[in-house]
Amino acid sequence: MARQALTTGQVTVTGEGVNAVVDFLMPAPHKIVHTGTDLWTDAGSDPIGDLRTWKRLIAQDSGRSADRCILGATAAEAFRVNTAVKAQLDTRRIDMGIIRPEELPDGVTYLGFLNDPGLDLFTYDEWYLDDNDVEQPMVPVDRIIMGSTRADTVRAYGAIQDEDAIQGGMVEAQYYPKSWVTKDPSVRHLLLQSAALVIPKQIDAFVTVKVV
């Protein structure tokens, strides 16, 4: 859900009797697709200048200052080998920042910090199975997601559609555990239910860009 929200501005909610799209109305200028010479694989591109522009866009529209940027695998490689990036980071008279990858738990890699425009850079190597049971990267390989860790976001929980939960007066819960026994053969069944929805209230505090 978080991936969908931050890369499309929408979340598709499916389940028994439910098939809906929750649209958080992400502004069109925050969903960017680079083409031609703007692609980070082009020799004339300026990735650091792009990051600076998108950070200003977030600040102007949301009042929040973006402080993190997550790069897909291909986008991260394009950034690392980009001529303009290497030239700016190699400047001795101006401290632009440093790229020094550091492995963190759960598939996260910290790439480094850019003093200008003031961003921590990360990659996130995690995958999930889509509705067709096809493995997909949690962060699209050709995209970056920039945002503010101080943006107003919430993980909400709806009512559990279970007769026992309803009779018990439960309206909403993060998790609803349930256990029952069948006989001959005797088996105890365990069930855990949740009706979660990720809600980026300040969706304009994020930008998603196809950069390669």
Image: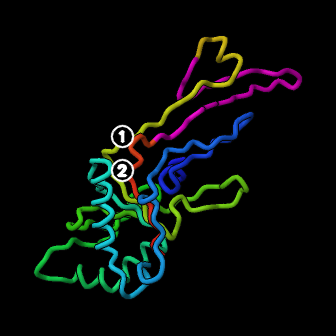
* Mark 2, other Cα within 10 Å: few <14 / some 14–19 / many ≥20: many
Looking at the rendered structure, the kind of residue marked 1 is Asp
Q: Residue at x 32, y 79 (%)?
A: 46
Magenta highlight on residue 177: yes
Q: Which residues are magenta?
A: 171-199
**Can you say whether 200 is above or below 29 in the image?**
above
Q: How many marks?
A: 2
Q: Residue at x 49, y 62 (%)?
A: 125
Q: Position of residue 70 (x, y in %)?
A: 40, 61
Image quadrant in which you'd find residue 113: bottom left
Q: Residue at x 56, y 62 (%)?
A: 137
Looking at the image, tell me whether mark 2 or mark 1 is earlier in sequence order.
1
Q: Residue at x 53, y 58 (%)?
A: 138
Q: Position of residue 95 (x, y in %)?
A: 15, 74
| In this picture, residue 152 sits left or right of residue 161 | left
Looking at the rendered structure, the kind of residue marked 2 is Ala
Q: Which mark is residue 200?
A: none
CA gap, disc 2 and disc 1: 9 Å
Magenta highlight on residue 36: no
Marks 2,1: beta carbons within 8 A: yes
| In this picture, residue 11 sits left or right of residue 209 | right
**Residue labelled with disc 1:** 152
**Can you say whether 25 is above or below 145 in the image?**
above
**Residue labelled with disc 2:** 205
Image quadrant in which you'd find residue 195: top right
